[in-house]
Amino acid sequence: MIAMHKLVLRSVTKSYTKGTTVLKPFDLVAQSGELIVLVGPSGCGKSTLLKLIAGLEKLDDGQILLGDRDITDAEPRQRKIAMVFQNYALYPHLTVRENLAYPLRRQKLRMPAITEKVAMVARQLRLEELLDRRPSQLSGGQKQRVAMGRAIIREPDLFLLDEPLSNLDAALRTHVRGEIRDLQRRLGTTMIYVTHDQVEAQTLADRVVILRDGEVQQIGPPQEIYARPANIFAAAFLGAAPPNFLAGRVINGRIDVGQASLPFSDLPGECRTALAGREQVYLGLRPELLRAADDHYGDHLVLHGAVSSREIVGNTQNVYFRTDTACADMTRLSALAGRYLTDELVWTTENSNTGDTVKLAIRPEDILFFDAEGQAIGTHGSDTL
Ligand SMILES: Nc1ncnc2c1ncn2[C@@H]1O[C@H](COP(=O)(O)OP(=O)(O)O)[C@@H](O)[C@H]1O
Ligand SMILES: [Mg+2]
């Protein structure tokens, strides 16, 4: 039977030193059995949030509920939460068997029960052959499995994983990622998984929380954030290559983007309404939604350019092309988004050569629109709770 352990964070705030807020009031409800992935750049407060939930740091304000318990002021040990770190934190002088048994010994469980649980977890994580080895005799992936084993053996109400795969090479990361996902599904234990890797976020999450400077940018299922990012930051964070951002000017019922122009009448209704009365907007064009245009793209936005370089990625290519669509006013946008505001755009395609002149088209309904502050317009970001 799967236990019901919903996690509720209410206005959780934290600062380490007076005046510098690491976590703005943070609200989240993780449903029982849900896998929440918390993403954001280094230093945005991800580890801090996990430490607050685990009780390793004290919150300034707010409330934390787990299941039917208020654990805001509970001792870490009483919280029934297991945390897995990037560096595994295994005891080097203990064997795998002893490492797995350790949390149970601390709980003063009796020996036969410990032996039985260790055997069960070893079977689940395919550690049976490794039980007598010490951590120094294990590969990175094996160490990670032991760390996971030590977390699940306590049958916690909640898992907290802090960049657990960062020390693994790419192939192993993909593999262990799948294992963690399967394990979480099988156990049905609520999990908060921290990463700065958007691929991990998209492949693992039931819902993603995008964090920036201690502030939530958007919460929602990965596909929803991809389709309707709440702002330029969220748009740039999720997706294989970040979108191309172009400056556009709203004039007389149309949007001018360099030499290209898009009449309002070609836009979805909600978008038209939201754009009316504005001057400066930004357009986000996902590289994978740009297509080579011939002359039959009547209602599309069509950009002209010359291919400047290309990167081959498996069976597709990232093609960079220069356009006349210079983006002047980027000062009001964030530094991150600003990096992508250039006259060199990326386009993901199967075939193109350097020097080719290209016409690229995108459907109006595929364009993301942002206001001068980088907030989405014309669409609504997903739920904020
Ligand atoms: N113990 C601490 N004392 C003071 N500042 C800290 C402490 N731990 C983290 N910070 C600061 O809080 C911010 C968020 O850190 P952290 O939560 O570790 O970020 P992330 O895990 O997202 O990389 C950073 O600016 C970091 O320097
Ligand atoms: Mg961290």
Image (cartoon, rainbow, N blue to C red):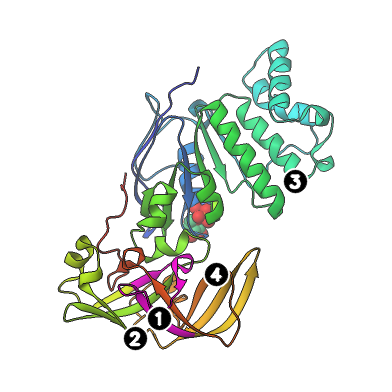
Is tag 2's residue or tag 1's residue first in the polypeptide sequence? 2
Residue 113: name its quadrant.
top right
Circle 4: is it few (<14), some (14-19), or many (20+) Cα within 10 Å?
some
Where residue 145 sits: x, y (%)? 70, 37
* Residue 140: mark in rendering: 3
Is residue 98 visible to us here?
A: yes
| Label 4 secondary element | strand
Local SS, label 3? helix
Q: Amino acid at mark 2?
A: Gly
Q: Mark 1 = which residue?
A: 303
- Residue hosting label 4: 349
Image vertical order of residue 153 relative to residue 9, above or below:
above
Sooner in the amino-acid sequence: mark 3 or mark 2: 3
Of residue 214 and residue 172, the one placed in the foreground of this image is 172
In contact (CB < 8 Å): disc 1 and disc 3? no
Q: Nearer the viewer, mark 2 or mark 1?
A: 1
Query: Disc 4 residue type?
Result: Thr
Q: Of the two numbered discs 3 and 4 on the same chain, state the one appearing first in sequence.
A: 3
Could you tell which of marks 4 and 1 lies nearer the N-terminus? 1
What crowding class fits label 3: few (fewer than 14 Cα within 10 Å), some (14-19), or many (20 or more)? some
Nearer the observer, 339 or 67: 339
Quarter of the image for the C terminus: give it: top left
Alpha carbon distance from label 3 to label 2: 51 Å
| SS category of the residue bearing label 1 | strand
Say which of marks 1 and 3 sits in front. Answer: 1
Q: CA distance from mark 4 to mark 1?
A: 15 Å
Is 272 colored magenta in this rendering? no
Q: Which residue is mark 2?
A: 258
- Name the amino acid type tagged 1: Leu
